[in-house]
Amino acid sequence: MKKKICLFLIMFLSFFMISPKVEAKKSDKVTIYLFRGKGCGYCRSFLTFLSNINEEYGKYFELESYEVWYDADNNALMKTISNFLGEEARGVPYIIIGDKVFAGYSSSDDAEIKSTIKKLYNTKKSKRYDVFKEYKKENKLTGDYTSKNLKKTLEDESIELKGEKKVTSIQLEGLPNVVLNFLFVAAGTGIVIFYNNRKFKSLEDKLNSKKNK
């Protein structure tokens, strides 16, 4: 009984004292807002560009895309947001990064887009311009809007996401604690076994002593 209690206490303490880190920090990434049309060639070119820079710039940005050709609510949202910016959207792709608008896309925009991402990322988060947040301060968005992140958007257009980091069930930063946790339990179990072996040895010695008498 004592053995079971000791094992339980060791496992209980190890769980609370040395547990893996759980990542709770909110993303500091820049949000790229993209209004696009499924099957749009220029939109596809822009998405391919994002995929190509993902390995280097993926730590700086995240994508929030709205398909507007087959989604009336998303189309209305594009018009609302573009009018709010004073940059009427006359087609897609319609790209917003901070307070910078790219109405359309060409490979000649690549350097400016990367520069805009980096510049906004290096701006203090509380001072970054976010058109959706600014609009919501004075207005209410109504409608059933549907957005997708970069990975889902690329899948929608059958584009491979390059530079994607493989996520395992155990986060790298938590791995050392998992190892320590295992060692702690193993050491505690060893102590319990050693303690019980000593008790058994003591009992055996007493029995042998009585036999000898």
Image (tube, grey):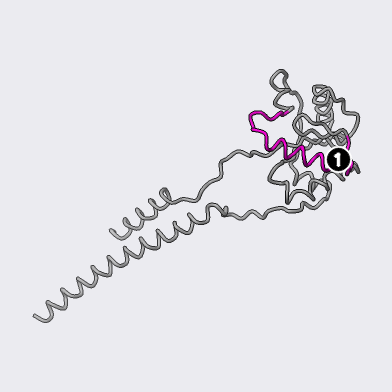
Residue placed furthest toward the bottom: 212
Q: Magenta segment, principal secondary structure?
A: helix
The image position of residue 152, as x and y in percent, is 76, 45
Amino acid type indicated by mark 1? Asp
Q: Is residue 160 above or below residue 145?
A: below
The front one of 110 and 212 is 110
Which region is colored magenta?
Answer: 104-130
Closest to the observer, 101 or 187: 101
Q: Quadrant of residue 60?
A: top right
Please report the residue visible at 36 percent of the width from the left and 63 percent of the height from the top.
Answer: 189
Q: Inspect the magenta stretch and tell me whether residue 109 lies in it.
A: yes
Vertical comparison of 85 with 44: above or below: above
Residue found 41% across the figure and 49% down from its top: 17
Where residue 206 appears, x then y in whole percent? Answer: 15, 73
Residue 136 lies, in percent from the top left, at: 70, 22
- Report which residue position mark 1 lands on: 109
In front here: 3 or 59? Answer: 59
**Percent x, y for residue 74?**
81, 31
